[in-house]
Amino acid sequence: MRRSPALRCVIDVAVRERETSKLFQAAADEAPGVVLRAIAEAVNDHPGVERHAFEPRALASSELLERGKLADGRMLLESSEARDDPFWAEHRAALGLPYPPQSPRTLQIITELALAGRVDDAERLYTERVATRQLEPYELEHHVRALVALGRSDDAAAVVAREPPQRRWEAQRAWMRVALRRGVEIAPALDRLLVARTDRGVDWIADGVIAAELIRFARGMGHAHLMAPLRRRLLADLSTAELGLDSEFVLASLADEILAHDDTDEIAALDPVLARSEMNVWKRYVAAVRALHHGSLPQAIDAIAAVRGSMLSVLYVRAWVRHAVAGLDDAVDRRFVATACPPGT
């Protein structure tokens, strides 16, 4: 893929906002592997990126591997300066590369081995390194992920059932993400998540994670239609809630996903709830994502330019992904740069 001045512009914005590390997650659910690789290489080569803070190619590789794009993920990880770092042990395991045999990230390695189809190796490692010891409380989510990846749903359910409501919620969220990666037993996992949400009680910050990350991840994995019960439950609760900073973030993130899924009934239910929004920052965000999903690319670029705060670069990178997928038209590239990075910025 040829170099794009617009991509350099997006990274300039991210550097100014100190949000560079968020570009990969923002782009991953909408970008083909080759496009995310191009973003990672451009970030890696940008002189303004703080190299000590993270390794761009390794971070992008992690996003690709989680979405099953192993070939692109391997290319980035093997070219990364962090390729031998023990922190990336589970990613090396997923790719069939050597990993530290006594890694403290055993549960993560088991998860990735199982999801990569090496279930016998994962089971063996679980028997040798996990089944024989008492797990620490902080390992709950990793343990649930490993059990679900191994297909041991009954064992996972037994582990989760022993926990208090907030911990059950966190565990079910981890379970849901692995179910989406496996592509099986998604509906039962979602049912469990909805029950755990009810037991947990009102927590808009936790719901913000679901709306901004989990539902989007499901869309990126091709399972957006299966998340309709969660989208509709959130929207119903928002329709009667007293809106504030946290709940309006949930509403804006949910609007992004409803507009992306483009279900007529869901959009019809969304618009009256959006009309209750009183915070300009979220109104601008919704206008930007509406243009991203349903407007022309120039319209999306202009709408994003009106957004304020740390969301600017993550919206611009999503617009650039759409631009790249469409073929990197030179006129759009110039329009992008003129709007996002005018002279003097």
Image (spheres, rainbow, N blue to C red):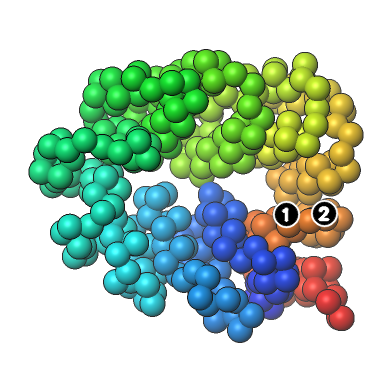
**Is 244 displayed left or right of 91 in the figure?**
right
Identify which amino acid the numbered label 2 is placed on. Val
x%, y% of residue 52?
51, 75
184 and 243: which is toward the camera: 243
Identify which amino acid the numbered label 1 is placed on. Met
Does residue 34 appear in this view?
no
104 and 225: which is toward the camera: 104
Query: In the figure, residue 247 lies in which quadrant?
Result: top right
**Is 223 displayed left or right of 208 in the figure?**
left
- Residue at numbered disc 1: 311
Residue ID at (17%, 38%): 133
x%, y% of residue 85?
32, 69
x%, y% of residue 36?
51, 63
- Residue at numbered disc 2: 307
Query: Do the numbered discs 2 and 1 sit on residues whose CB atoms are within 8 Å?
Result: yes
Task: Say above or below: 257 vs 101.
Answer: above
> What kind of element bears circle 1?
loop
Marks 2 and 1, how far apart in space? Answer: 7 Å
Query: In the figure, residue 156 lies in which quadrant?
Result: top left
Residue ID at (58%, 76%): 50
Mark 2 Cα shell of 10 Å, populated few (<14), some (14-19), many (≥20): many
Extreme residue in the bottom direction: 47
Residue ID at (79%, 56%): 309
Tell me the quarter of the image containing the C terminus.
Answer: bottom right
**Is 29 displayed left or right of 266 in the figure?**
left
329 and 164: which is toward the camera: 164
Task: Say above or below: 41 vs 219.
Answer: below
x%, y% of residue 197?
54, 21
